């Protein structure tokens, strides 16, 4: 599920900022080309509710590495745009969007750190067969 949300975040960022920004899921050790985004999930958790219903909390940090010398200005522009482009995302194969909550950002060491939660309920599927075989014998009554 987390990988699906990361993919949906990538799609939303590409829609808002275009293809000129690289989006990374894994840490880049050398050769980071700016501008770019780095997406990671921080401390996901799951709590059981009734029966097979679970509540998952997933906080994401999307880091933006700016390219210009006007770092603060560029980061604020990108952060403001991220509020709207990440408000609703849709995972591939789902028909309903997930709403982002607890959005905020901060600038630290010339990098924008944007935080958003995608919290949702999930259901644990049962491995029971839905139906077994059934044989029926019937008689037709004659007459009128």
Image: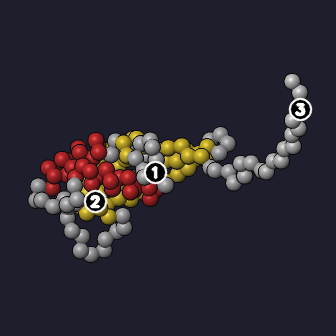
* 29 on left or right of 90: left
Between discs 2 and 3, the one toward the N terminus: 2
Q: Nearer the viewer, mark 2 or mark 3?
A: 3
Q: Secondary structure at mark 2?
A: strand
Between discs 2 and 1, the one toward the N terminus: 2
Query: Nearest the camera: 42 or 140?
Result: 140
State how the image is colored: secondary structure
* Residue 134 x, y percent position in the rendering: 81, 47
Q: Secondary structure at mark 3?
A: loop
Query: Which quadrant of the structure image shows residue 139?
Result: top right
* 97 to 72, vertically: above or below: above
* Residue 64 x, y percent position in the rendering: 25, 57
Label 2, on which residue? 37
Between discs 1 and 3, the one toward the N terminus: 1
Query: Which quadrant of the structure image shows residue 27?
Result: bottom left
Query: Nearest the camera: 26 or 109?
Result: 26
* Residue 81 x, y percent position in the rendering: 23, 45
- At label 2, counting other C-alpha atoms closer than 10 Å, the crowd grade (few under 14, some 14-19, many 20 or more) is some
Q: Which residue is pictured at 84% across the width and 44% down the height?
A: 136
* Residue 17 x, y percent position in the rendering: 22, 52
Residue 21 in view (yes/no) = yes
Q: Nearer the viewer, mark 1 or mark 3?
A: 3
Q: Which mark is residue 141?
A: 3
Q: CA distance from mark 2 to mark 3?
A: 75 Å
Label 1, on which residue? 93
Q: CA distance from mark 2 to mark 1?
A: 24 Å
Q: Nearer the viewer, mark 2 or mark 1?
A: 1
């Amino acid at each position: 599920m987390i990988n699906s949300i990361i993919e949906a975040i990538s799609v939303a960022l590409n829609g808002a900022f275009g293809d000129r920004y690289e989006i990374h899921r894994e840490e880049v050790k050398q050769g980071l080309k700016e501008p770019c985004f780095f997406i990671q999930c921080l401390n996901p958790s799951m709590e059981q509710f009734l029966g097979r219903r679970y509540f998952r909390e997933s906080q994401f940090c999307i880091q933006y590495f700016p390219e210009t010398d006007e770092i603060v200005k560029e980061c604020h522009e990108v952060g403001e745009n991220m509020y709207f482009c990440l408000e609703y995302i849709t995972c591939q194969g789902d028909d309903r969007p997930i709403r982002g909550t607890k959005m905020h950002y901060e600038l630290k060491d010339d990098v924008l750190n944007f935080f958003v939660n995608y919290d949702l309920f999930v259901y644990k599927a049962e491995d029971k067969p839905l139906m077994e075989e059934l044989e029926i014998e019937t008689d037709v009554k004659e007459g009128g």
